[in-house]
Amino acid sequence: MRFQCHSCGFQTEAPDRYAGKSVKCPKCKTPVTIVAQGTPPPANHGYSVSEFLKKTRFSQKQGHGFELEKDRLLQVKLNGRVWTKLGAMVAYEGQMTFTREGIFEHGVGKMFKKAATGEGAQLMKAEGMGYLYLADNGKKISILHLKGESIFVNGNDLLAFEDGIEWDIKLMKKLTAMLAGGLFNVKLTGTGMVAVTTHHDPVSFKVTAHHPVFTDPNATVAWSGGLVPELKTDVSFKTFIGRGSGESFQMKFQGNGFVVIQPFEEATFQAG
């Protein structure tokens, strides 16, 4: 007798006593009926509505706080309030209200910082009880559990954080940063969950006083709170004739900590 999964294509031989019985494919776990050699598969197998729902059925996580349903979908078990990137909600179950961040929501100081930096990571607060699902343009999601620590996150890569986390907008004030139009990031401090997004898998580098790390600002996602990066320029005649590094601006991290990048240059930093 032949066992053939019409979903993933896996094949093997099966004892005659299993003829006509339904078993799960050992590779993809799809239920398959064992048939005699030469028996054609049922027409349109795998394309029915029920098969589609079976393959795409959502499996709710039973944890608390932030959980990854898939690597590009964040589940938040909400019982109170959480802050998210504006427009990140894709679905929810339960009773919730969504409110765009008010102009004075976090004080006048932050309002002026947002205006001065042109900060684009507008926030939304979700309040209530239930399950909230967040995503950001198909980017991969990573969850970080802060335990009294601090981390800086590029404003465009911050997806969500729990209500107990303190946050503030930071702007690099070096002369080179001002000439480049500035570079903003969000400092998150406290105890709780933070979700960040990246194009493809994130990569982290250890930074020490004797081993600095240089990154492209457009690829830099986050770094530990104890680091104070410097923005340096590489604009020279060599750059224009193709003999330089090809990157006009770099971030230099030196100290003790880590920096996280993504293998993708996100066009969020512009000279101007």
Image: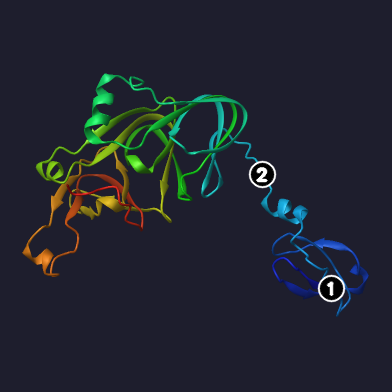
Whether residue 185 is situated above or below residue 104 in the rendered picture: below
Whether residue 129 is situated above or below residue 69 in the rendered picture: above
Position in image of residue 175 (x %, y %):
9, 42
Identify the residue at horizontal 87%, vertical 72% (top origin): 35
Identify the secondary structure beneath mark 1.
loop
Q: On the image, numbered disc 2 is attached to which residue?
A: 59
Identify the residue at horizontal 43%, vertical 35% (top origin): 86
Say whether residue 235 is left or right of residue 126.
left
How packed mark 1 is, by other alpha carbons closer than 10 Å (few <14, some 14-19, many 20 or more), is some
Identify the residue at horizontal 28%, vertical 38% (top origin): 185
Front residue of 157/42: it is 42
Q: Quadrant of residue 1?
A: bottom right
In the image, what residue type sits under mark 2?
Answer: Ser
Answer with mark 2 or mark 1, whichever residue precedes in sequence. 1
**Which label belongs to residue 14?**
1
Position in image of residue 58 (x %, y %):
66, 45
In the image, what residue type sits under mark 1?
Answer: Ala
Whether residue 56 is situated above or below residue 83 in the rendered picture: below
